Image (cartoon, rainbow, N blue to C red):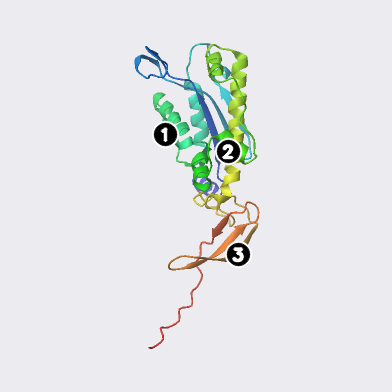
């Protein structure tokens, strides 16, 4: 049984999960102007109030605090929603998100620790904001602006911070808008990832998971050999995927005919 499980694990397809979270603001008391940051007394840390997660080209789940039976208006308790996020990440090989490295995963990890959860299994992170900055030169790398520039869609418009306040007060319509907003962000992030993926030279190799031959970024076997890739000491066959367009080199080097040095 153990050997069978090991074999199945070796030939599985990589599990790629796009995720986005929504959080509540920190609360505290302060004097003076609103742009000053001298907090007199800290009341409550922000919490995760919603998340949307989508398996690549597969199922999507979007939940907010109001979806849980113990939810009470005005009282934030993200323990159950954090546990649900933990279970999803446990199943993922690769996590995708916009600004996921600096915000989402650091925030998620802080809530894992708060609720005494062990770290989930190892995974790789792909940050679409980081990749967009590396690949393109634009005036803005916000998700909405990138979606507009690449003609792949936009974020859902809403009334702003008042939507968060209405959710805190238990407004069901506001919670519904929050869920739709979160849901759309995840769909747009996945589209952005797929748009950028052929340009990602540092993308984790997906064929390693299944040990199949093909394009390492999309696993398609519809590839063509085109020329050679030359390094300082060797050369390799070069391929282009005919589905996603990604260029990559083969894993086995080509034989190099070394001619003896001529006598001078």
Q: CA distance from mark 3 to mark 2?
A: 31 Å
- Tell me whether circle 3 and circle 2 mark residues in contact (CB < 8 Å): no
Which percent across, then down, holds residue 198?
Answer: 58, 50
Horizontal placement of 102 versus 173: left or right? left
Mark 3 or mark 2, earlier in chain: 2
Which percent across, then down, holds residue 37?
Answer: 37, 20
Query: Nearer the viewer's eye, disc 3 or disc 2?
Result: 2
Number of residues whose C-alpha sits closer than 10 Å to that of mark 3, classed few (under 14), some (14–19) or many (20 or more): few
Q: Is residue 166 visible?
A: yes
Q: Residue most toward the bottom?
A: 264
Q: CA distance from mark 1 to mark 3?
A: 43 Å
Q: Is residue 55 visible?
A: no
- Front residue of 136 and 18: 136
Is 113 rendered above or below residue 234?
above
Q: For the point 61% across and 34% down, which residue is it?
A: 187
Number of residues whose C-alpha sits closer than 10 Å to that of mark 2, classed few (under 14), some (14–19) or many (20 or more): many
Which percent across, then down, holds residue 192?
Answer: 59, 40
Q: CA distance from mark 2 to mark 1?
A: 32 Å
Is 114 rendered above or below residue 125?
above
Query: Nearer the viewer's eye, disc 2 or disc 1?
Result: 2
Circle 1 — which element?
Answer: loop
* Disc number for residue 259: none
Locate residue 239: give its quadrant. Answer: bottom right
Which residue position holds label 2?
146
Which residue position holds label 1?
119
- Tell me whether circle 2 and circle 1 mark residues in contact (CB < 8 Å): no
Which residue position holds label 3?
226
Is 33 rendered above or below residue 91?
above
Mark 2 or mark 1, earlier in chain: 1
Q: For the point 63% across and 40% down, which residue is it?
A: 57
Q: For the point 46% across and 65% down, which residue is it?
A: 231
């Amino acid at each position: 049984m153990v050997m069978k499980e090991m074999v199945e694990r070796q030939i599985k397809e990589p599990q790629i999960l796009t995720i986005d979270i929504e959080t509540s603001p920190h609360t505290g008391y302060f004097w003076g102007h609103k742009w000053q940051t001298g907090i007199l007394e800290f009341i409550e840390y922000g919490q995760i109030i919603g998340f949307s997660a989508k398996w690549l080209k597969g199922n999507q789940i979007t939940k907010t605090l109001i979806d849980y039976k113990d939810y009470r208006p005005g009282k934030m308790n993200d323990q159950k929603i954090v546990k649900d996020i933990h279970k999803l990440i446990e199943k993922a090989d690769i996590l995708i998100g916009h600004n996921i490295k600096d915000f989402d995963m650091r925030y998620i990890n802080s809530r894992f620790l708060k609720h005494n959860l062990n770290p989930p299994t190892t995974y790789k992170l792909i940050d679409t904001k980081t990749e967009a900055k590396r690949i393109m030169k634009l005036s803005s790398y916000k998700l909405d602006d990138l979606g507009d520039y690449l003609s792949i869609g936009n974020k859902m418009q809403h009334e702003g911070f008042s939507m968060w306040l209405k959710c805190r007060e238990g407004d069901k319509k506001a919670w519904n808008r929050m869920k739709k907003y979160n849901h759309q962000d995840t769909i747009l992030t996945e589209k952005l990832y797929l748009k950028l993926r052929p340009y990602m030279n540092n993308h984790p190799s997906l064929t390693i998971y299944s040990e199949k031959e093909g394009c390492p970024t999309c696993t398609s076997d519809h590839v063509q050999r085109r020329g050679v890739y030359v390094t300082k000491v060797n050369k390799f066959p070069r391929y282009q995927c005919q589905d996603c367009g990604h260029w990559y080199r083969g894993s086995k080097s080509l034989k190099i005919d070394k001619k003896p040095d001529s006598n001078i």
